[in-house]
Image (tube, rainbow, N blue to C red):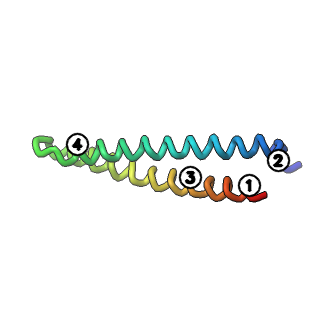
């Protein structure tokens, strides 16, 4: 027997989309702040090379996560827009 997602009322589904969109926006903001922190650490002139490399790696990872979260947020925005039209 295949697994099926539970059926929820449309209003409840809309609430889930809105909450998910809020969470994605907060997550994106947090990752962007983390990326800024890592970039700042990477450019401190007195840091040793290992610290600079680790900070650059952290910024790169934050870039990747920001991209993933932003794509998910855009999908949620499209979903929210389509549910408001129906």
| Residue 74 x %, y % | 57, 57
* Residues marked 4 and 1 touching at CB (< 8 Å): no
Q: CA distance from mark 3 to mark 2?
A: 26 Å
Question: Going by the picture, which residue comes out furthest to the front?
Answer: 85
Residue behind mark 3: 73
Q: Which residue shows up at 35% across the image and 53% down it?
A: 60
| Residue 1 x %, y % | 89, 48
Q: Which residue shows up at 83% across the image and 48% down it?
A: 4
Q: Which residue shows up at 54% across the image and 45% down it?
A: 24
Sequence-wise first label, 4 or 2: 2
Residue behind mark 4: 41
Task: Give SS at disc 4.
Answer: helix
Residue behind mark 2: 3
Q: Quadrant of residue 54?
A: top left
Q: CA distance from mark 4 to mark 1?
A: 43 Å
Q: Which mark is residue 83?
A: 1
Which one is closest to the eye, mark 4 or mark 1? 1
Sequence-wise first label, 4 or 1: 4
Q: Which residue shows up at 34% across the image and 47% down it?
A: 35
């Amino acid at each position: 027997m295949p697994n099926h997602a539970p059926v929820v009322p449309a209003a409840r589904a809309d609430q889930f989309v809105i909450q998910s969109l809020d969470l994605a926006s907060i997550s994106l903001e947090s990752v962007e702040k983390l990326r800024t922190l890592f970039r700042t650490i990477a450019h401190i002139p007195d840091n040793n090379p290992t610290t600079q490399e680790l900070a650059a790696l952290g910024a790169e990872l934050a870039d990747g996560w920001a991209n993933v979260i932003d794509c998910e947020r855009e999908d949620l925005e499209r979903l929210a827009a389509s549910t408001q039209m129906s």
